[in-house]
Image (spheres, grey):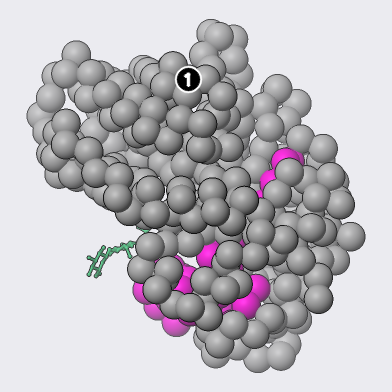
Amino acid sequence: TQKLNTVAKSAGKTYFGTATDNSELSDSAYIAILNDGTMFGQITPANSMKWDATEPSRGSFTFTQGDQIANLAKSNGQLLRGHNCVWYNQLPSWVSSGGFNAATLSSIVTTHCSTVVGHYKGQTYAWDVINEPFNDDGTWRTDVFYNTLNTSYVPLALNAARTADPATKLYINDYNVEYAGAKSTALQNLVKSLKSAGTPLDGVGLQYHMISGSMPGGLASNIQAFTSLGVEVAITELDIRMTLPPTAAKYAQQKTDYQTVISACKSVTGCIGITIWDWTDKYSWVPSTFSGQGAACPWDATYLKKPAFDGIVAGLG
Ligand code: G3I
């Protein structure tokens, strides 16, 4: 049987990985597959390094859950992706409704990023320092960070992360930037302006939460548009959902769609790795968010490989 990380490395990529979550780690059948470093050479905690988990009240940091994932990566010989430092969502209310002035919020952002990235110093391959800063039309998301600090929170967080762990790769991660359009252009412009200002930035994460049968064209050229700015690209949260229930025809379409995404990454040297947003439908975030949609992962809820698995292998081949 083919092992995805092994195949990805043969294709010149750094890793093939998956998201996971603490609540899943007591499932022994799940853990047996997750722990196979030849299948998954990298893991991302889906929730436990986010702001609400790590700094639920100001200055009070908790790393128990995040450490569980970091230690798992270590014992499995897997790379670890930190996720994430600054995001409008899963933000504790003491931040989101804080009413802080710019100086105070700047200090809060700096302290948060320094402390969290610093805690995992030497343990991560990369960090999603900035998560989802843009609206779909390419304007800035008017969250508490932008409303209080304008765009200055971005270099603030990146600089804090670089100081806290000079070796980890610093990323901006977003969705609906996988194809050409206003949002992708906005992210490219941000990369350009950060680079020209000398702000530390190593990579762009393209999330790739996609819909089967509606795959946009031009994926490789969009990836190339980022790598030509001097950053690496990672596919950070790949899943491809469908309307339930699945049928053989829908699985065949999904296989094609996985192959399309993976081969786009394969074709661009600077697209360094791929992470799926959990490997089994049993624990996918999709059905609870998109009613009637699901079956987005390459393994089904009983841990059987779907045709999508072969699509990934074919895309890397
Ligand atoms: O921890 C509580 C638990 O105590 C409670 O009993 C339970 C009941 O609802 O909720 C649990 O929290 C949930 C959490 O996942 C942990 O399971 C939240 O309700 C739920 O909203 C949260 O969903 C996460 C989602 O981000 C939140 O935005 C998903 O697991 C996670 O996969 C998803 O990941 C995001 C990426 O971080 C960023 N990109 C999009 C991606 C998909 O939404």
Please state which of residues 77 and 150 is positioned toward the viewer in this rendering: 77
Which residue is found at the position 62% from the left and 51% from the top? 77
| Residue denoted by label 1 | 162
Residue located farthest toward the front when viewing the structure as drawn: 75
Q: Is residue 189 left or right of residue 102?
A: right
Q: Residue furthest right?
A: 317
Residue 75 visible here: yes
Horizontal side of 26 relative to 93 (left or right) equals: right
Whether residue 94 is in magenta: the answer is no
**In the rendering, at what x and y percent does residue 53 appear?**
27, 49
Q: Nearer the viewer, residue 173 or 21?
A: 21
Q: Is residue 296 magenta?
A: yes
* CA neighbours of label 1 inside 10 A, class few (<14), some (14 to 19), many (20+): many
Q: Residue at x 73, y 73 (%)?
A: 309
Q: Is residue 167 left or right of residue 146?
A: right
Q: Residue at x 56, y 87 (%)?
A: 302
Q: Is residue 218 above or below residue 316?
A: above
- Quarter location, residue 181: top right
Where residue 210 sits: x, y (%)? 59, 62
* For residue 220, side relative to residue 73 (left or right): right
Q: Quadrant of residue 33?
A: bottom right
- Asked whether residue 260 appears in the rendered view, the answer is no
Does 174 sit above or below residue 252?
above
Q: Tell me where residue 232 sits by quadrant.
A: top right
- Residue 38, x across and y down, in percent: 72, 61
In magenta, the rendered stretch is 271-300
Give me the residue at 70% from left, 23% from top.
229
Whereabouts is ligand 1, in terms of quadrant?
bottom left
Q: Secondary structure at mark 1?
A: helix
Of residues 49 and 256, the one nearer the viewer is: 49
